[in-house]
Image (tube, grey):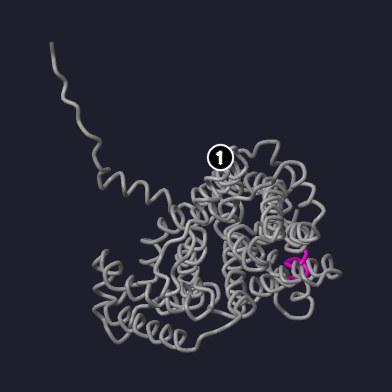
Amino acid sequence: MSHDTVRAPSWPGYAEVRRVTTLLRRESVGGMLLVVAALAAIIWANSPASESYFALRDFRFGYAPWHLELSVGAWAADGLLAVFFFMVGLELKREIVVGSLRRVNTAIVPVTAAVAGVAAPALIYVAIVHSQPSLLAGWAIPTATDIAFAVAVLALVGSHLPGPLRIFLLTLAVVDDLIAIAIIAIFYTSDISLLPLAIFALLVAVYAVIAHRGRAWFARTPWGAWAVLLPVGFAAWAFLHASGVHATIAGVALAFTVPVAASRRRPEIRGMDLAEQFEHRFRPLSAGIAVPLFAFFAAGVSVGGGEGLLRAVSDPVTLGVVAGLVLGKPLGILLGVRLLTLVTKVRLDPALKWIDLAGIGLLAGIGFTVSLLIAELSFPDGSPHTDDAKIAIMVASLLASVLASAVLLVRNRRYKQLALAEDVDADGDDVPDVYQQPVDRDR
C-alpha cells in the first residue's frame, strides 16, 4: 500500500504574483472587476440573505477618539477610495507636467469638453427636480465619469480607433475627476475644524519633502514607500477626515507632491519618474482591491420587489440622474467642443471625427465610482433617494455603455477596413475589390 505525500497549498510564487499584478494593470480587467463587484452586491442585497450583507456593510470598527470609528462601508468610501484618488492625482500631475495638459493648445479641447460635460448633466438634473428643492442636493451625481469603467469599455470595443481618441477620453476623464474632487471639497463639506486641517497640511508638506529628498531610494526600494510614506499618508488622511473635509481629497493632495520629472540639479537620479513608478506599483491595489471593494459596499441596493422599482422609477432623482448621464454628458461634450471651434481658432485633431466624439461623449456617461460616492454624500443617511440615485447610476452606466459600444464598434470596423486597405496598398499587391472604391476618411 503506497502512501502519497499530501502537500499543503503553498503561497503563490513571485512569477504568479507578477502575472496577476500585470493583469490588474489592464483597464479592461479593472473595469470588469468593478462590474462583477457591483453585481455581486446587488444580488446579495436582494437575496434571502440580504440582512447579512447590510450587517457587514454597517458593522463599525475603529478608534472613536480620533473620529475613526466607521462602518465598513464608510471605510471603503472614505479610506479605500482615497487610494483610487491617489492614482487619479498621480495621473493628473503627470498629464500637467509632461502630458497632454502641459500645452494649452492641446489641453483646451478636452478641458472644455470636460467642463461642458459636467455643466450640462447638472443643468438637466436641476431642470427635472427643480420643483422639489430638497432634491437639488443631488445635482452633482450625474456630473462624474468613471475613468476605469469607460477606458475598459473603450479597450474592449476600440482596438482600431485612432490613438488621439483614447488620449482625448483619458484627458477628459482625468479633468472630469479633478472637477468632481473640487465639487466634493467645496459643496459636500459642511463644518470644518481648522486645527486638524492645519495638521493635515503640515503632514502633506512632510510627505512632499520625504518624497523629493528620498526619490532615488524610493525608486530603488519597492518596499520603501510602504514603510515610510504610507504611515505619513495615513496620518494625513486621518487628520483630513477629522477636519470635516471628505477624506478622499487626501489622496489627490498627497499624489500632487510626488515628483514627476527628473531633477536637473541631481544628475544621479536623472530619468527617474517617481510618480510613474508609484502609478505602476500601486495600480493593482487600486484596480484589484480598493475600487471593487468600494463598489461592492456602495452598489448594494435593496430593490424591494415591484414596489421598490416603482418608487425608483417615479422618483425625479432617478430620471434626473439617468437623463444627466445618458443625454447630458454627450450633449455637453459635443456642444462644448463645437462652441470652442466656432469662437476660437482651435481645431480638432485631424484623426478625430465628430461621430467619434459622439461615441466618446456617450462613453463619458458611465458615471460609476465617483457618482456612487456623490450619491452617498447628497442625501441624509437612510434616505430612499440615495438608493434610487444608485439604481439610476447603474442603469445609466449600462445604457451609456451599450449606446457608446454601438457607435464605437461601427467606427472601429471602419478604421479596421482603412488599416487593411492601407496595408494591402503599401505591400504593392492588388487591392481587393472591396477597397477599390475611394476611401473617405471623413465618413
Q: Position of residue 246 (x, y in %)?
A: 54, 74
**Looking at the image, which is closer to me, 246 or 354?**
246
Q: Residue at x 36, y 66 (%)?
A: 277
**Looking at the image, which is closer to me, 161 or 33?**
33
Q: Residue furthest right?
A: 131
Circle 1 residue = 49
Answer left or right for 405 relative to 296.
right
Answer left or right for 379 relative to 263.
right
**Looking at the image, which is closer to me, 303 or 3?**
303
Q: Residue at x 61, y 47 (%)?
A: 157
Stretch in magenta = 331-337
Q: Residues within 10 Å of mark 1 (few under 14, many from 20)?
A: few
- Which amino acid, mark 1? Ala
Magenta run includes residue 378: no
Q: Is residue 31 above or below residue 173?
A: above
Q: Position of residue 288 (x, y in %)?
A: 44, 52
**Looking at the image, which is closer to me, 93 or 290?**
290
Q: Position of residue 35 (x, y in %)?
A: 57, 47
Q: Residue furthest top?
A: 1
Q: Is residue 253 above or below residue 305?
A: below
Which structural element holds mark 1? loop
